[in-house]
Image: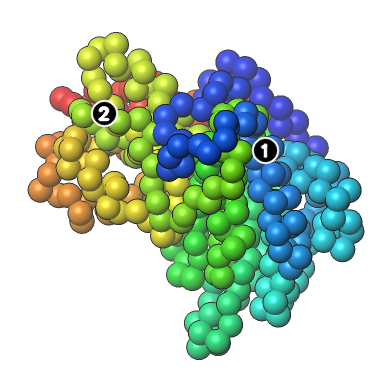
Amino acid sequence: MVDESLIEGRPGFPGTAPSAGGMGGMGGFDNPPMIMDYAQALNQALREEMRRDPRVYLIGEDIVLGVPFGVTKGLADEFGPDRVLNAPISEAAIVGSALGAALTGLVPVVDMHFADFVTCAMDEVVNQIAKSRYMFGGQVSCPLVLRMPYGIGRSAGGHHSNSVEAWFLNTPGLKLCMPSTPADARGLMKTAIRDPDPVLLFEHRGLYRLTGEVPEDETLVPLGAADVKRPGRDVTVIATARMVHESLAAARRLAGDGIDVEVVDPRSLVPLDRDTLAASVRKTNRVVIAEEGPMRGSAGTWLAWVVMEECFDDLDAPIVRVAAPNIPIPFSPPLETFAMPAANDVVAAVHQVLK
């Protein structure tokens, strides 16, 4: 079992500092917000949706115990073995059964354990789930959520550390979201469960112990609504998941040099909020894109192209990208740190785009 506890001060991890920037488009609170970590926020969203809708059930490996990340901890005690299902170690069987359940009226939430393991169920995801509405001429919906714990960290090695969102960005029929804060995690999970189409929810493993404010009142975060986590005037940094926090840290450092950085979190890649991204770029005229996936063929490549399509004439400098190198993620802690993009890389990218 991989130990997923975070080590404070580890390069590239935000530790347990309160989340900074915007509050996920929530606006004002009717009641005072709660403070909880990212994993607790996901747990709360699952609990609330299972209470709301008896069709919602969970399936995955070891989820009754809530391992390895604690997201499903305690849910079996409330909802029982019919709605919190421990499955054999067969991702193809888990995802395939969830597809059948979704097509016949249930709402499965599949825990992939590690997003890397989705390779064992690629036919089910790419050829069946993604195409189900189309292949049946729009007569069926497929309300299914794939929880995708992913990301570099804690020396998990090349089989447990990958950013795989770009594979599915290239697959029509799937919706993709990447929450970066506890509030967004809860809000996007609830939205994903209620969506009539399949949604892949990417949960960065390095954020599970990140704490932040979560509204007491029920708040849904819509798919396709980006959030400006920090307003600025000089450079737009479009960042996803863990790199939102690295970018906010970089922005605080750059503010000391008189550079005002705007940090924009797309929150979902499909659908994508092109309008919010374009409005930011038209204000700052310079763009850095920060992600954790490998540089070649990544989600950041798509975001850069969207910026070019929407704002080519507004750019005063070429787009600069921050991403991992095109290598398998090493097990060795020093090599892993080398492969992990962090705030220093964002600072360097901002200086480059301002030259």
Tell whether label 2 touches label 1 (CB within 8 Å): no
Tell me the tag on residue 232. Answer: 2
Q: Residue flagged by tag 2: what amino acid is it?
A: Gly
Residue 280 place in picture, x, y as percent: 24, 41
Answer left or right for 36 relative to 355.
Answer: right
The residue lying at 15 percent from left, 25 percent from top is 355
Mark 1 vs 2, N-terminal side: 1
**Quarter of image, res 110:** bottom right
Res. 116 visible in picture: no
Instruction: Tell me the SS state at disc 1.
Output: helix
The residue lying at 37 percent from left, 56 percent from top is 272
Viewer-proximal residue among 253 and 155: 253
Instruction: Tell me the SS state at disc 2.
Output: loop
Compared with residue 305, is residue 291 higher up or lower down, i.e. above or below?
above
Q: Residue flagged by tag 1: what amino acid is it?
A: Ala
The residue that disc 1 covers is: 39
Residue 18 place in picture, x, y as percent: 54, 23
**Quarter of image, res 254:** top left
Res. 348 visible in picture: yes
Residue 103 place in picture, x, y as percent: 66, 78
Residue 327 place in picture, x, y as percent: 50, 40
